[in-house]
Image: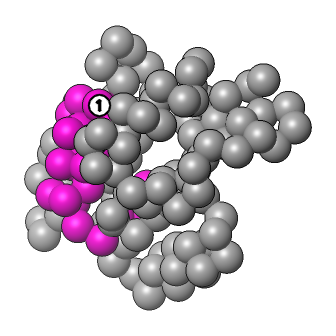
Amino acid sequence: MLVDDQDRALAFYTEKLGFVKKTEIPLGEHRWLTVVAPDEQSGPEIVLEPAGIPEARTYREALVRMGIPYTAFQVDDIQHVYSTLVEREVKFTMPPANAGAVTIAILDDTCGNLIQIFQVN
């Protein structure tokens, strides 16, 4: 994920979305910072990458302007996940909506990205 602020992103992804920090390696001004699902710590990692170059910021801002999520996560029970995240004060740009074969919702990660969650119907 391209993020505005690594500390804010780490707080959001761990405290709001429930991921856990896996890797933190200092790299000058920034760091190699990853989070993982708590029950799959050897699984895929999400890199919280600084959006430091203008092209990265332009790309990300264009996606947000068009309402296009940067990434998507599949969930088993979208209504439950949505309710849990709303309780954690996560802001959604789109509540759960039926889209044919899937139900989708879109949230703002507070770090410059939209994220879609979806459930296969």
Q: Secondary structure at mark 1?
A: loop
Q: Is residue 59 visible?
A: no
Asked if residue 109 lies left or right of residue 32, the reply is right
Which portion, as a residue range, is magenta? Answer: 1-23
Query: Is residue 34 covered in magenta?
Result: no
Compare residues 118 and 88 and report the one nearer the observer: 88
From this viewpoint, is residue 116 visible? Answer: yes
Residue drawn at the location 52% of the way across and 80% of the way down: 61
**Residue identifier under label 1:** 18
Residue type marked 1: Gly
The structure's colour scheme is: one colour
Q: Name the one closer to the observer, 18 or 71.
A: 18
The number of discs equals 1
Q: Is residue 64 left or right of residue 90?
A: right
Question: Which quadrant of the rendered structure holds the N terminus?
Answer: bottom left
The residue at 39%/57% (across/down) is 91
Q: Position of residue 3 (x, y in %)?
A: 35, 64
Report which quarter residue 83 is drawn in: top left
Is 53 situated left or right of 23 in this image? right
Return the x and y of residue 50 as percentages of the image width and height: 31, 66
For the point 34% across and 50% down, which residue is it? 90
Q: Residue 18 lies in magenta, yes or no? A: yes
Q: Position of residue 111 (x, y in %)?
A: 33, 65
Residue furthest to the right in view is 100
14 and 33: which one is in front?
Answer: 14
Nearest to the observer: residue 16 or residue 30 = 16
Q: Position of residue 33 (x, y in %)?
A: 24, 47
Q: Quadrant of the C terminus?
A: top right
